[in-house]
Amino acid sequence: MADAVSLVDLKFEYRKGRPVLDIPSMRVAAGERVFLFGPSGSGKTTLLGLMSGVLRTTVGQVQILGQDLVKMSPSQRDAFRGSHVGYIFQLFNLIPYLTVEENITLSCRLSPERRKRLAGKSLATAARDVAARLGIDGLLKESVTALSVGQQQRVAAARALIGTPELVVADEPTSSLDHDHRERFIELLFEATKAAGSTLIFVSHDRTLQPLFDRAIALPEINRASKLEAAA
Amino acid sequence: MVVLSLAWHSLKNRKLTTWLTVISIALSVALLLGVENVRTGARESFSNTISGTDLIVGARGGSLQLLLYAVFRMGSATNNITYESYQHFAQHPAVAWTIPYSLGDSHRGFRVVGTTNDFYEHYKFRRDRKIEFAAGKMPEGIFDVVLGSDVVETLKYKVGDKIVIAHGISTKTIQDHADKPFTVVGILKRTATPVDRSVYISLYGIEAVHIDWSDGGPPMIGEEVPADKIKKDELKIKQITAFLLRTKSRIDTLRLQREVSTFEDEPLQAIIPGVALAELWRTIGFAEDALQVVTLFVLIVGMLGMLVSLYTSLNERRREMAILRAIGAGPMKIISLLVLESGLLAIAGSVLGVALIYGLSFVAQPIVEQQFGLYLPVQPPTSTGYIYLAAVVVSGILIGFVPAVKAYRNALLDGLSARL
C-alpha cells in the first residue's frame, strides 16, 4: 500500500532566512494512526497546513496519497484538499450560522469530488450515518451555537469524516476538552476513521494521549530547523 | 448555489448590520427614485399644464410671452387681436373648437379671464382631464363669475357672493369696476394647474365692465352705464387677447400655424403648446440636474456604508474563512461569497427602496398635489429609474470585491491558524 504521507527534504519559511520546517524525511503509512507531538511553536500547525495544501512550499516533496502537492496549482490543491482531506481544528471548527447538519455536509456541498465519495448516499443519509457514529445524530437540526465544546468537536470530526477522506488531520482537537471527554472523543474518532479506512494524523502537545496511537512522531526530532534554533 | 446559500445564511446571522445596511441602501435608492419621480412628475405636470390644444394664437410677439400669459397667467400681452380675426379662425373648416381668452383685468391679485363656455367644455389638462365644477354651474349671465380653486381657498368665497373686478393686473389698482359687481355662480375643482389661479367671466362680462370706458380711461362721473341697463345682445365684442385652438385632424396643425402667422388682416402668431412648453422647461430645468447630483452623492454614501460594514465584519470572520479554506474552498469561492453578500445587500436594498418610494408616493401623492400643485404619477420606474437600480446592484457587486480580495488575502495569510 502506498504511503498516505511522504515528505522528502521539505523546507518552509514564513520569512526569508527564518526556516520553520526542515524535514529530511517523514512517512505515514495508509491506515496508520499517528500521534504527532511537539511543544507550542514547533511548527505543528504549519506542517499540517503544508500537508493539506493550504500552505505552499517550493522546496522538497509533499506527497499525499501518492500525489505531490508541490507540483499542483493552488486551485488543484484546494480541490485535492476538499476531496481527500478531513481537517479538525483545535477550536471553533464550525460556521456559526449553519446548523449541525449543514456544517457536516458543507465539505460535500463545496466539493463535487467529495460528494461523489458518498457512493450514492444522499447528503442527509451520509450526515446521519457519520453523526450516529459520533453520537451526535440527535443534534443534527440544532444551531451549532447551542452546543457544548465537546459536541462541537464531534460535529467537526463528523464533517472531517463525511465522504470517507483518505487522510484526516486533527490539530489538537482535544485540548479544550476535559479528561473524560478527551478519551471518549479519541475513541469515537478512532472508530470512525477505522470505519472510513482513513489515515489519521493527530497533533497534540499532551503526551498522555500517545499510548492510544499506533505510532508517535516527535516533530522536533525530525525537524532540523528546530534543532538549529535550539542550537542558536 | 452552495455559496449563495452560505452568503444568505451569513447575512441572516448578522441581522442587525444586515438590516442597517439594507435600510441605508434602501433610503438612498428611495431618494434617488423619489427625485427621479419628482423630476418626471414636475416635467409631466408642466408639459401637461395644458393638453388637447393644438395651437395657441395671439398677437405677434414673443412666443414665450404668449405661452406665459395664455397658459400660466403671467405677464401680459402687448397687443390684442380683433374679434373678427378670431371669428375667422373659429369658423375655419379645419378647426374643431376654439377657446377665446380676454385678459387684462384682475381680482385681488388673481387674473380675470374672459372666455366663453367653450372653456368649460373643451379645456383639457394632464392629457384628458376636463374642467369640473366643485360647486355651482357654468356662467350664463353677463355678470356671472366662476372661480378657480386657489382663488376660493385664498379669498374664501362661496357661490352667491358678489365680487368686484379691478382694472389692470396690479393688486394695488385704484381703478375698479365697483359699479358692476359680479356674482359667483360656480367654483372649479382643483386642477393643480394655473387654471386654479384665475377668475372666469364671459367675454360679454369683459365688454360690459368696459362699456362706458373710452380711450383706456374710466367714464366721467355721471356717465357710467348702470349694470342693469346692459343687455347681452347690445354688447359687441371687439377684441380678445388670445385663443386656444383644436384642429379636426392633427395633420392640419402645421398648416394652420402657417396660416395664422401669414394672416393678412392682422399680425398674428400661433405656437404649439408642447413645443413651447418643452422650450420653457429647458430654460428652467437646470435645477433638476443639481438635485440629481445631490442624490447621486447620497447613493454613493449609502454604498460606502455597505463597504464599511462588510469590511469591518471581515475581522470577526477570519475564522470562518479559515474553516472554509480547510474544507476545500478555493479563493474563488471565498471571493464569490463576499461578492454575493454585497450583491444580495444591494438587491435587497433596491427592492426595499422601490417598495418604500412607491408606498410613500402613494400616500404622499394627494398631499403633494394639494400643497404644491405637483402631480406625481405612481407608475413603474422610468427607464432612468431602471438604469439607477441596475447601477446600484452592479456597483454593489463591484464594491463586494474590495472586502472579498481582503478576505482572500487574510485567508492566505492565516492559513489554518487564524485565531478567533
Image (tube, coloured by chain):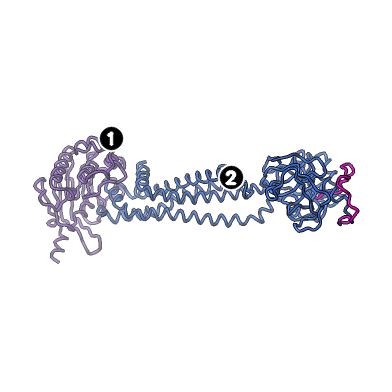
Q: Amino acid at mark 2?
A: Gln
Q: Which chain is blue?
A: B
Question: What secondary structure is found at the residue carrying circle 1?
Answer: helix
Residue A96 tag number: none
Do the residues under discs 2 and 1 have CB atoms within 8 angstroms? no
Task: Indicate whether residue B237 is drawn in magenta.
Answer: yes
- The residue nearer to you, when weighing B305 against A25, is B305
Chain A image colour: purple
Q: Amino acid at mark 1?
A: Ala
Q: Given the image, what chain letter belongs to the residue carrying mark 2?
A: B
Residue under label 2, please give it.
Answer: B365
Q: Given the image, what chain letter belongs to the residue carrying mark 1?
A: A
Q: Residue furthest bottom?
A: A232
Residue A114 seen from this side: no
Magenta stretch bounds: B214-241
On the rendered image, what quadrant is the N terminus of chain A found in? top left
Q: Residue furthest left?
A: A211
- The x, y position of residue B303, in whole percent, is 45, 53
B72 left or right of B400? right
Task: Indicate whether residue A229 is drawn in magenta.
Answer: no
- The residue nearer to you, when weighing B366 against A41, is B366
Q: CA distance from mark 2 to mark 1?
A: 53 Å
- The residue nearer to you, when weighing B342 against B375, is B375
- The x, y position of residue B334, in whole percent, is 34, 49
Residue A124 tag number: 1
